[in-house]
Image: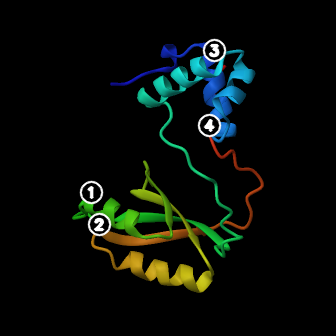
Amino acid sequence: MIFTTDDLDDLDLRLLDALQRNARSTFAELGELVSLKAPAVHDRVKRLEGRGYVRGYAAQLDAKRLGFELVAFVSCYTSPDCDYDAFIETLAALPEVCEVHSVAGEESFICKIVTRSTQHLDDLLTRLKSQRGMARTRTTIVLSTPFERGGITVPQ
């Protein structure tokens, strides 16, 4: 079942925004932000989760502090005989791959990856290029990230 933001009222939108900013907020803290009591917030959050507006909760880790110094985007150009489902499964199994996006254009997929070094990146690219269905790759190394939203802008 597909839902749109038409299904959401102003309180729902404000709760989604607050949860995205700090998913560790208590129901009481969220209630203060939207002028509701904690049990009412609990019910609304559970309903939002049940309807698929909240996909999950996760900590945002600092990749550099964990030793992953290099971020890159790898464009994957596939061969005509590529089995996309198997190919995506292979990409998702690589721990360096953070995101896989199916895209329009010459390439079939763009992957966001993190590695410890250029040598680690080289090793990953060697593994990627040996995957069935991969024709070639193009890599763009990130020099810096001056802006990263870390979520979506919730419509008001």
Q: Which residue is mark 3?
A: 10
**Residue 152 shows which numbered tag?**
4
Distance between mark 3 and mark 4 Cα atoms: 16 Å
Q: Is residue 155 visible?
A: no
- Ranked by sequence position, the earlier of labels 4 and 1 is 1
The residue carrying pointer 4 sits among few (fewer than 14), some (14 to 19) or many (20 or more) residues within 10 Å by Cα, namely few
- Ranked by sequence position, the earlier of labels 1 and 2 is 2
Residue 16 position by quadrant: top right
Distance between mark 2 and mark 3 Cα atoms: 47 Å
- Ranked by sequence position, the earlier of labels 2 and 3 is 3
Residue ID at (69%, 22%): 31
- Residue with the most extreme right position: 146
**Residue 79 shows which numbered tag?**
2
- Ranked by sequence position, the earlier of labels 1 and 3 is 3
Q: Amino acid at mark 2?
A: Ser
Residue ID at (39%, 57%): 108
- Residue 30 lies, in percent from the top left, at 68, 27
Q: Please tell me whether mark 1 sits on a helix, a strand or a loop.
A: helix
Q: Please tell me whether mark 3 sits on a helix, a strand or a loop.
A: helix
In the image: residue 9, left or right of residue 89: right
**Residue 85 shows which numbered tag?**
1
- Residue 99 lies, in percent from the top left, at 49, 57
